[in-house]
Image (cartoon, helix red, strand yellow):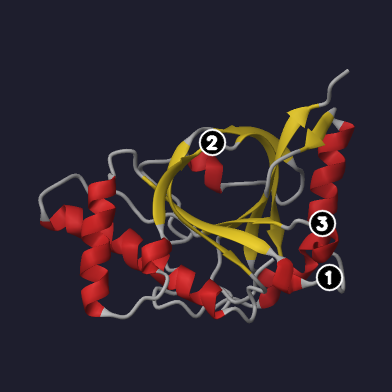
Amino acid sequence: MAENLGNSEYQLTNTMAQTQHNHVSDGLYKASKKTPEFLKVPAMKYLMIDGTGDPNTSKQFQDSIQALYSLAYGIKFGRKKRGEESDYKIPPLEGLWWSDDPKNFMDGGDKSKWQWRLMISEPDFVSQKDLTIAAEEAGKKKALPALPSVRLEKFAEGPAVQMMHVGPYSTEHTSIARLHDFAKESGYEITGKFHEIYLSDPSKTAPEKIKTIIRQPVAKQSS
């Protein structure tokens, strides 16, 4: 969905090039490039922020990425400085996408009406206190307009189907169609918000090599 991901101060550096994430199942950040697969996503704690608009032109979108990474690193290094548990790596950036009118995601649709939620998962031991301390410290170092809008919250996605898309974000529609067809042919219906997990930094990766896990929550079709 979004091409404007590589300009953050942190440049999406902790992606799946580093495959181990202590606080999450490794399988959540791996997916087949050939065949869609089912999985059940457990409830997880995330730093998250919501917004609206075209991610390719939106300042709010870029501000949100900066705020998330500032806090994710701030929490980790703050805990380390205080002698608290901090032996984990920052997982990839994730995004949920939706719109009041699904037609806005079709060719020629109104991207200004897109709604999104950017997220970075956190270990269960990270607390609201950690977030508050990190936000105070980050605010002292740099003006981050989106900082007050970031929250720490549990997100339970549940049953889903996913696969790896390799290529530019603009060609994702072919993989999304495969994902939806696979779910429906397997007796499931599409539910929830479309989910992307960004495994590549588009500012450093050739478009044809960009890796994105695409995930769609599903529910068993009622008989």
Helix, strand or loop at label 1? It is loop
Instruction: Say what amino acid the circle numbered 1 marks.
Output: Gly
Instruction: Say what amino acid the circle numbered 3 marks.
Output: Pro
Q: Quadrant of the N terminus?
A: bottom right
Q: Position of residue 197 (x, y in %)?
A: 58, 56
Q: Quadrant of the C terminus?
A: top right
Q: Residue at x 36, y 76 (%)?
A: 144
Q: Is residue 120 left or right of residue 200?
A: left
Q: Residue at x 79, y 53 (%)?
A: 176
Helix, strand or loop at label 3? It is helix
Q: Earlier in the sequence, mark 3 or mark 2?
A: 3
Q: Position of residue 58 (x, y in %)?
A: 59, 78
CB under 8 Å between callouts 3 and 1? no
Does residue 151 appear in the picture of this structure?
yes
Q: Position of residue 198 (x, y in %)?
A: 57, 61
Q: Earlier in the sequence, mark 3 or mark 1?
A: 3
Task: Determine which residue is flagged by label 1.
Answer: 109
**Disc 1 residue crowd, few under 14, some 14–19, many 20+, Cα 10 Å:** few
Instruction: Say what amino acid the circle numbered 2 marks.
Output: Ala
Task: Determine which residue is flagged by label 3.
Answer: 102
Task: State the residue in front, 25 or 153.
Answer: 153
Which mark identifies residue 156? 2
Q: Is residue 16 left or right of residue 116?
A: left
Q: How many angstroms separate mark 1 from mark 2 (CA)? A: 29 Å
User: Which image quarter: residue 95?
Assistant: bottom right
Helix, strand or loop at label 2? It is loop
Q: Residue furthest top?
A: 223
CB under 8 Å between callouts 3 and 2? no
Q: Residue at x 54, y 80 (%)?
A: 59
**Disc 3 residue crowd, few under 14, some 14–19, many 20+, Cα 10 Å:** few
Q: How many marks?
A: 3
Would you place residue 102 above or below residue 182 in this image? below
